[in-house]
Image: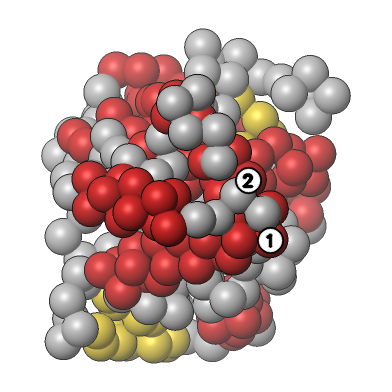
């Protein structure tokens, strides 16, 4: 029982970090554990134990959320490693297995949502013309239509980008994009003591989708690592942990982890900025917030 195990911990054990640590279950995912991740996880861990005690539950769910540039996956992996070293069974579930579309199709849907609504907004603004259409087609081919700097050269891009960004914000991280219901059902089954649960796996191709039957009989804490792990639609989180980052850090981290092929594009920058806005909105619900420098923040400070 988690409650009893937590009570037995007087001084938390922080073992030396080796290559044998649990990590998220996203197929092909790469993690790069560096000293800064170890320092942050070591800072969080004693506080996390106290928060787990406060839940009073026999099985608890921790959410580690934030932009991937802050080391969300690495820190979640380390927290699970520390829990196991202290006699507490832990499993790391990657929320990136639960979008409604595989990455290539979701990327296409994001761009379609942006461009179709941006174009409609441009028409509604009264600034659309045949000349604008030709210029816009050229910008589409070069993938420069989301570039905010081009608004000085093409003022009509202002209503275009504003409408597109608004529509994109209404899609990113919502249940139109992410299957919060399925993840919530998994968390519910775990808390109810179901010993074996089918978990989804998703690669980057259409045929790379399957389910693995995972044994939870010896798992006390389920850690969900996910950019959207603080979303209000996700039910069953006991200890939300927010890791602060900037869109720039997130973009660089995605490049290092080979998450997608266009990490430096203007559209990717817009996506990361909108995701950062979502994180800011959910900060007040986090029970632990850690800054980029490794300091604890209150929701008000954040």
Q: Looking at the rendering, which quadrant does residue 57 occupy?
A: bottom right
The answer to which of marks 2 and 1 sits earlier in the sequence is 1
Label 2, label 1: how far apart the Cα atoms are: 9 Å
Residue 119 percent location from the top left of the image: 52, 61
Decide: is 254 above or below 300: below
Residue hosting label 2: 159
At x 20%, y 83%, the residue is: 206
Query: What residue is drawn where x is 79% and y is 18%?
Result: 301
| Relative side of 229 to 114, left or right | right
Dot 2 alpha-carbon crowd within 10 angstroms: few under 14, some 14 to 19, many 20 or more = many
Q: Is residue 238 visible?
A: yes
Instruction: Report the quarter where the C terminus lies.
Output: top right
The residue identified by callout 1 is 124
- Measured as percent of width and height from the top left, residue 95 is found at 45, 64
Q: Which element type, helix, strand or loop, lies under badge 2?
A: helix
Q: On the rendered structure, is 39 left or right of 176?
A: left
Q: Residues within 10 Å of mark 1 (few under 14, many from 20)?
A: few
What x and y, as percent, mark residue 58?
67, 66
Point 50% across, 23% down: residue: 152
SS assignment at label 1: helix
* Circles 2 and 1: CB atoms closer than 8 Å: yes
Circle 2 or circle 1, nearest the eye? 1
């Amino acid at each position: 029982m988690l409650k009893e195990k937590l009570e037995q911990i007087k001084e938390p054990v922080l073992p030396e970090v080796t290559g044998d640590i649990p990590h998220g279950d996203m197929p092909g995912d790469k993690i790069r554990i560096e000293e800064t991740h170890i320092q942050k996880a070591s800072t969080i861990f004693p506080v996390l134990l106290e928060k787990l005690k406060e839940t009073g539950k026999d099985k608890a769910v921790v959410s580690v959320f934030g932009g991937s540039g802050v080391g969300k996956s690495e820190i979640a992996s380390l927290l699970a490693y520390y829990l196991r070293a202290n006699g507490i069974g832990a499993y790391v579930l990657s929320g990136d297995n639960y979008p409604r579309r595989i990455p290539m199709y979701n990327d296409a849907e994001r761009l379609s949502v942006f461009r179709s609504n941006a174009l409609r907004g441009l028409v509604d603004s009264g600034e659309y013309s045949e000349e604008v259409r030709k210029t816009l087609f050229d910008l589409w081919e070069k993938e420069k239509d989301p570039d905010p700097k081009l608004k000085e050269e093409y003022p009509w891009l202002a209503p275009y980008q504003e409408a597109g960004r608004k529509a994109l914000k209404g899609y990113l991280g919502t249940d139109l994009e992410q299957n919060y219901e399925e993840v919530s059902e998994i968390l519910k089954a775990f808390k109810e003591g179901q010993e074996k649960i089918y978990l989804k796996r998703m690669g980057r191709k259409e045929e790379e989708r399957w389910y693995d039957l995972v044994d939870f009989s010896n798992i006390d804490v389920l850690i969900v690592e996910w950019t959207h792990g603080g979303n209000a639609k996700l039910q069953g989180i006991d200890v939300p942990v927010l890791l602060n980052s900037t869109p720039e850090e997130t973009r660089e981290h995605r490049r290092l982890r080979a998450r997608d092929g266009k990490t430096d594009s203007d559209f990717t920058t817009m996506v990361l900025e909108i995701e950062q806005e979502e994180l800011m909105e959910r900060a007040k619900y986090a029970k632990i917030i850690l800054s980029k420098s490794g300091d604890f923040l209150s929701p008000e400070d954040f």
